[in-house]
Image: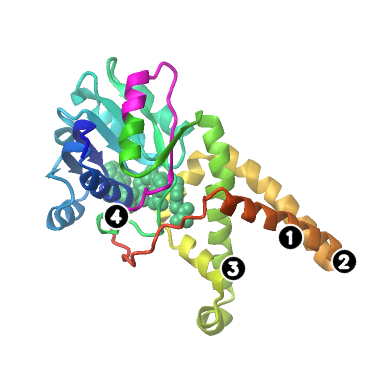
Amino acid sequence: MTQIYDRVALIGLGLIASSMFWAIKRAGLAGEVTGYARSEATRETARRIGLCDRVCDTAQEAVEDADLVVLCVPVGAMGAVAEDIAPVLKPGATVSDVGSVKRHVIKAVSPHIPDGVHFIPAHPLAGTEHSGPEAGFAELFDNRWCLLVPVEGSDIDAIAQLRTFWEGMGSNVDEMDADHHDLVLAVTSHAPHLIAYTMVGVADDLRRVTDTEVIKYSAAGFRDFTRIAASDPTMWRDVFLTNKDATLEILGRFTEELFALQRAIRTGDGEQLFDYFTRTRAIRRGIIDAGQDTDAPDFGRGKTST
Ligand SMILES: NC(=O)C1=CN([C@@H]2O[C@H](COP(=O)(O)OP(=O)(O)OC[C@H]3O[C@@H](n4cnc5c(N)ncnc54)[C@H](O)[C@@H]3O)[C@@H](O)[C@H]2O)C=CC1
Ligand SMILES: O=C(O)C(=O)Cc1ccc(O)cc1
């Protein structure tokens, strides 16, 4: 039990905030954890399941006297939340976030951060397709990366403290600049999600088939697509609207490769297909060798509307 912050405030009580709360409690990382959710129903659920030591009816009340404030709302809502809490932030406090996109969050939040308050954006590379306060679990961040994306002039001690905090929640921590983060995530997460959404949409268009065979006989590949395509629509809408440039760049490259493979199929170029699949197989093996194939367990939690 090592306490890193006296008081932590979590704003937006969904999958990530609730997982953080349970991970904080597991390791005793904070004296008190306050929480705020926009809807009364979510606040009630949080109180019922013991999520947060104190659930507040306003964001300002939750952040008052907090040493660490973590914004856990969809990327498109970060700026408005930061503006709301700015007047009551404690001098010397750290504001962080968990948003999937970093350049936009920095642009939206930075102008509201008062002098004397540290702003250190972060992104845990861990999640599930479930959302809401009941979706969280303490092990979500275990052995997963959390990327810290310090802004210019970020305080070294405040960064070190936040790093220790995420390590206490089970994560491996790295630092990255915002542009690089957004490009890397466009490749590893954002474009793949869009492709999954599209593939499931295509299957749905073929309703005659999906009503029966696709669901009944779905093999692992399509099953993975449906899991990912069940992710929260608000969150993913915001990701694509705010990481537009990097996602479009990657989708452009994806489309070119797809056309090349399409052509190889049409022309019967088995050698090209074989070579391509051999190259991609090596990438998968590289991930496994690097020990990065630790899928988070599925605790079977259902989707909860928030
Ligand atoms: N779900 C995932 O797999 C991961 C999500 N993230 C990021 O974490 C953040 C939170 O995601 P989740 O916890 O999955 O979402 P969630 O949907 O489970 O929870 C989001 C919470 O924010 C609240 N909220 C929405 N709009 C709001 C607003 N305008 N003002 C105040 N509260 C508002 C919702 O009511 C809900 O309580 C997002 O920025 C997302 O990009 C990061 C890593 C993984
Ligand atoms: O559920 C999955 O497969 C994920 O990819 C989880 C995830 C979603 C969004 C992030 O920004 C980080 C991780």
Residue type at numbered disc 2: Thr
Residue 233 falls in image quadrant = bottom left
Which sits earlier in the primary sequence, circle 2 or circle 3?
A: 3
Who is closer to the viewer here, 42 or 169?
169
- Local crowd size for mark 2, using a 10 Å CA cut-off: few (<14), some (14–19), many (≥20): few
Residue 212 horizontal/vertical position (percent): 52, 84
Comparing labels 1 and 2, the label whose residue is closer to the camera:
1
- Local crowd size for mark 1, using a 10 Å CA cut-off: few (<14), some (14–19), many (≥20): few
Task: Name the secondary structure under disc 2.
Answer: helix
Residue type at numbered disc 1: Phe
Q: Are marks 1 and 4 in contact (CB under 8 Å)?
A: no
Residue type at numbered disc 3: Val
Q: Which residue is mark 3?
A: 202
Please state the extent of the stretch shown in magenta in the rendering. 137-161
Q: Which residue is mark 2?
A: 267
Q: Are marks 2 and 4 in contact (CB under 8 Å)?
A: no
Comparing labels 1 and 3, the label whose residue is closer to the camera:
1
- Local crowd size for mark 3, using a 10 Å CA cut-off: few (<14), some (14–19), many (≥20): few
Left or right of residue 272: residue 155: left
Residue 134 horizontal/vertical position (percent): 25, 58
Comparing labels 2 and 3, the label whose residue is closer to the camera:
2
Label for residue 277? 1
In the rendered image, the quadrant that contains the N terminus is top left
In the displayed structure, 180 sits above or below 156; it is below
Q: Residues under labels 3 and 4: Cα distance?
A: 31 Å
Q: Are marks 1 and 3 in contact (CB under 8 Å)?
A: no
Comparing labels 2 and 4, the label whose residue is closer to the camera:
4
